[in-house]
Amino acid sequence: MQNTIKPYRKDTDDKKSQVSRMFNKIAPYYDFLNHFLSLGIDTLWRKKAISQLSAVKPKNILDVATGTADLALETCKQLNPEKVIGVDISTEMLEIGRKKIAKRGFENIIDLQEGDSENLSFESNTFDAITVAFGVRNFENLRKGLREMNRVLKQGGQLVILEFSKPRIFPFKQLFNLYFKYLLPTIGKITSKDPKAYKYLYDSVQAFPDGDNFVTILENSGFKSIQCISLSLGICTIYTGRK
């Protein structure tokens, strides 16, 4: 289902390779388009996601699919952690993230590493918390990626996932779908120079098993005490759980 959706459908490369190539291509435009196309609301979504960790005060955090490190930076602002490691398969996104980290003076706290979210290079039971923003729907094997996160999370550690979901309220659902399916890809195509990237965004969100379906997958991947927080009339959802 979700795993069959690829950015470049006629290409024979696997999804992981295509996603890496796509993000390398759009990296220079990624932050601008995120803020522009969401009218800046994506910043508030990240703040809300990280605030879910305020009660547990994690010191050692893994940010999976870190991209340009926006969530890692928000983690430092809110939680004052000792260490945040961000992993991503896109080298160009990571390079932009490192420049942002240096500009904000967090080089001693945030460490960005090239890495595969489905084959994490860390020992089991390493991290107090794991965060992911808009990344899990890009996994080639969703369940494998979630099991890997469960493996490297300490017992009792907390997972926070921020991901797009599908609005279900009439008429907002219909209006948002028009924007998401037609207008957003057109703007993204013109601005990012990659006609496939923002078409893939729409397709991957439609295929993603959001809501209760994703809760079931999280439970089957070893997480418990799972909660869902719907944002902006269902455009996004925060999922939290514990190992």
Image (tube, rainbow, N blue to C red):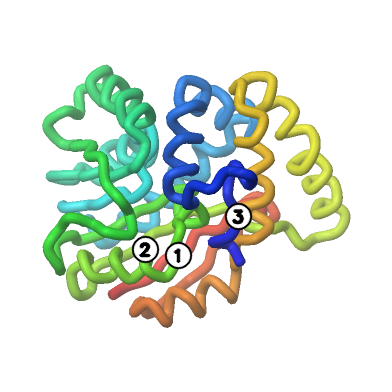
Where's residue 175, x and y in %? Answer: 84, 46
Where's residue 144, x and y in %? Answer: 37, 68
Camera-side residue: 164 or 75? 164
Q: Secondary structure at mark 3?
A: loop
Label 3 sits on what residue type? Ile
Above or below 66: residue 130: below
Where's residue 43, x and y in %? Answer: 50, 36
Q: Residue at x 65, y 31 (%)?
A: 37
Camera-side residue: 236 or 125? 125
Are circles 2 and 3 on residues that touch, CB within 8 Å? no
Point out the image quarter for the N terminus: bottom right
Give the image quarter of residue 124: bottom left
Q: Give the spatial CA distance, label 3 vs label 1.
A: 12 Å
Q: Residue at x 54, y 61 (%)?
A: 3
- Residue marked by disc 3: 5
Are circles 2 and 1 on residues that touch, CB within 8 Å? yes
Counting residues from the start of the chain, the first of labels 3 and 1 encountered is 3
Give the image quarter of residue 173: bottom right
Label 2 sits on what residue type? Gly
- Residue marked by disc 2: 145
Q: Secondary structure at mark 1?
A: helix
Label 1 sits on what residue type? Leu
Point out the image quarter for the C terminus: bottom left
Q: Residue at x 33, y 43 (%)?
A: 88
Front of the two marks 3 and 1: 3
Q: Give the spatial CA distance, label 2 vs label 3.
A: 16 Å
Counting residues from the start of the chain, the first of labels 2 and 3 encountered is 3
Camera-side residue: 16 or 81? 16
Where's residue 207, x and y in %? Answer: 65, 60
- Residue marked by disc 1: 142
Q: Residue at x 68, y 46 (%)?
A: 202
